[in-house]
Image: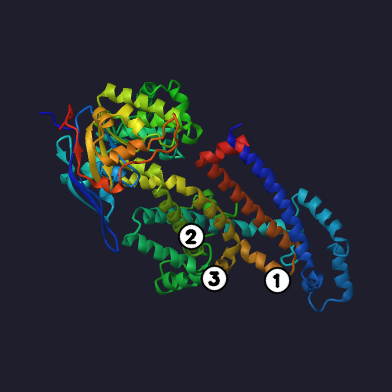
Amino acid sequence: MTPTILIFVRRVGISCIVLLGVSMLIFAIARVIPGDPARIALGPSATAEQVAKLRAELRLDEPITTQYGHFLSELAQGDLGISLYTNRPVVVDIAQFLPATLELIFVAGAMMIVIGLPLGIASARWRGTWIDNAIRMIALLGVSAPSFVWAVILMLLFAYFLPLFPIAGRISDTFAIEQVTGFLFLDTLIAGNLAAFGNAAWHVILPAFALALSGIGQTARLTRANMVETYDKPYVEMARSYGVPDRRIANRYAFKPSLIPSLTIIGLDFAAMLGNAFLVEAVFAWPGLSRYGVSVILRKDLDAIVGTVLIISATFLIMNLIVDVLVTIINPRIRYSRTAS
Amino acid sequence: MIVPTLDIRDLRLGFRTYEAYVEVLHGISLNIAPGERVALVGESGSGKSVTARIVLGLLQLLRSARISGSVVFEGRDLDRLSARERQRLRGTRMTMVFQDPTSSLNPVYRIGTQFHEVLRRTEPRINEHAARERAAQMLLEVSIDDPDRVFESYPFQLSGGMNQRVMIAMALANEPALLIADEPGTALDVTVQAQTLKLMRELVEHHHTSVLFISHNLGVVREFADRVYVIYKGRIVEQGPCASVFERPGHAYTRALMAAVPRITGGGLPDIGDEPRDFSQPLVVHESGGYA
C-alpha cells in the first residue's frame, strides 16, 4: 500500500469514531435542553393524554441509554427518525435541503481557492509595494465583517441598486427542473438545459461570494505570511542564484512549501461554512440545510436535530479527510515520516 | 592578453538605513583568471558573502543596497547589463554552491525535478527524459552511482554529503565559466566536507572552471585554492599565491587568522601575538607567480 492510502485508511477509521462520539454528545444535549418536545410539537391546546401518548411514541420516558440504543439500530438501517416539524422522515428532509447548501459552500470554497490563493501569492511576491498594500486592505476588509453583513451589502449593491444579479432563490421560477440529485448544477445538466444551468450559476454567485469573503481574506493573509517566510529560506536564494524567473519562484518554489498551512485553513473554513451558511441562506432565501437546522432546533425537533448535526459533522470530517490527503500529497515529509512511525 | 573570468575593481557596498548610511565593503579589487581557483578568506561579517552576491547580481535586487565600482565578468561590465541580462547569466555562465546543501534544496520537490529546472536554464525546451540522462551523467561525475534513486528522492531523504554532491553536480551541469562556492559544506561534518571538496576540486580542474571560493577555514583554502585574498572588515589586507601567503604571511591579520586555527598537537587555543590595531595595516601583495 502506498503511504497516502495507508494514511487515508487510518483517518477514515478515526473519523468513524469521532462521528460516533458526536452522535452521543448531540443525542444527549438535544434531550437535556429544557422543554418538552411533545408539548412543543402538539401546541398549547393539546391534552395531557395526547402529550403522554406522543412521549411514549417517541420513547422519551425510557432511560437515555435505551433511547440511544434504538437510535443506533435505526441508524444502521439508514433511518434517522421522523421530523415533528415537517412530519416527514428526517432522511428525506436532509436529502432535500443538503444539496442546496453543499452547492453553495462548494462554490464559496472554490472562490476561496481561486481568489484567495492568487491574492496571497501576488501579495507575497510584491511585498512592500502598493500591490501588497492593496491586497492586504482587501483581505482585512473581507475578514473583518461577518458573512451576513456582506450578504446584505452585496445584495443591496449588486442586486438592488445595480441589478446585475438576482435578489434571492436558487433558480428563476420560469425553469422547471426535474429533481434527480437535488444538486441544481447536476440536475440542469442531466435535463440538458444549459440556460437553466446558467441561471442557477447566476443565482449562486452573490450568496457564495458573501459566504466566501472572510475565507478569501483569511486564505490570502495566511498564504502571504507563509510565503514571506519561505522567501527567506536558502532554497529560494538558491533558485534565484540559478536565475529562475521571479514568476516561477513565486508560483512554484516559494508557493508549494507555503501551501500546506493554507490548505488546512481552507479545509476548516470550507467545513465551517456549513454552519455559517445559515445567515447567508436566510438573507438570500436559500432553501438550505443550515436554515432547516435552525428551525428544528427552535422547535426541539429531536430526531431532526440529531440528524442534521450528524450530517454536518460528517461533511466536516470528510472535508478534513480530503485536506489531510491533499496535505500528504503536497508534503513529502509527512508522507514518509508517518509511515515510518 | 587573457580576458579574466572575473575582474572586480574598487567595489564598494553600503546600505542606506533610516538612521544612517553604513559602508560594508570599502573598495575591493579581485580578479580570477580562466580556470583559476581563488579563495576569499575572512571572518564572519568581513564581507565575503556579500561580494559573492554582488557578482551574482542578487544584492542589486535589494533597494537599500548602494553599490559602486566595477564587476567585469568575461569582459562584460555587469553594471551595464540590464536586470534581465544579469539574470540570464545566473545559473548558466555563473553558478553557486551553498553552505548548507540540505536546506538549499527545495524540500517539496524531488531531486530529479530540481535538476531538470537547472538544466532548463541553458536548454529551455529540454524534456524530462533528456534531462534525466544529462543529470545522471553529472551525478556519475560526483561519484553517485545510483542516480535513479537519487532523482526519486526528496532532499530530506538523502544525507548531507549526498545533497552536497547533488549541488555540485547541479552547479557544474551547465558548464559555467565561474563557480562561486560560499563556505561549501560548512554544515557538514569534517570528513564528508573534505571528501566533497576533493571531488569538487577534481571536477573544476577537469572542466576548467574558474572558482571563487569563500571560506573562513584556512586549512580548506590551502588544499583548494591557487591564490588567496584575505579580507578583513570590508578591505582586502593580503593577497597572493596560496603557498606564498601561507608560508610568509605579511599582514598582522593574516598571521592572527592562521594562529587561530586549533592544532591537533595540543596547546589549546593559541595566543594571538599581534595587536588588533595592526589589523588595519595597508595591503600586502605577494607578487611571486600570481596573476595580475
Q: Mark 1 near mark 3, Cβ–Cβ under 8 Å?
A: no
How many numbered tags mark residues here? 3
| Residue, far bottom | A45
Viewer-nearest residue: A247 or A289: A247
Q: Residue at x 33, y 55 (%)?
A: A126
Q: Disc 1 or disc 2, which is closer to the eye?
A: 2
Q: Residue at x 68, y 59 (%)?
A: A309
Q: Is residue B171 above or below residue A54?
A: above
Residue A151: where, in percent of width, then height? Answer: 50, 69
Q: Is residue B224 above or below residue B44?
A: above
The quarter in which the C terminus of chain B is drawn is top left
Find numbered disc 1 in the image and state the secondary structure of the residue it sits on.
helix
Crowding near the residue tagged with mark 1, few <14, some 14–19, many ≥20 C-alpha atoms within 10 Å:
few
Residue indicated by mark 3: A283
Residue A235: where, in percent of width, then height? Answer: 40, 42
Find numbered disc 2 in the image and state the secondary structure of the residue it sits on.
helix
Where, by quadrant of the figure, is residue B21 drawn? bottom left
Residue A177 visible in this rendered orientation of the protein: no
Measure the alpha-carbon separation of dots 1 and 3.
18 Å
Tag 3 subunit: A
Residue indicated by mark 1: A298
Residue A143: where, in percent of width, then height? Answer: 48, 65
Measure the alpha-carbon separation of dots 1 and 2.
32 Å
Residue indicated by mark 2: A218
Q: Amino acid at mark 1?
A: Leu
For marks 2 and 3, the one nearer the N-term is: 2
Coloring scheme of the render?
Answer: rainbow
Crowding near the residue tagged with mark 3, few <14, some 14–19, many ≥20 C-alpha atoms within 10 Å:
some
Where, by quadrant of the figure, is residue B114 drawn? top left
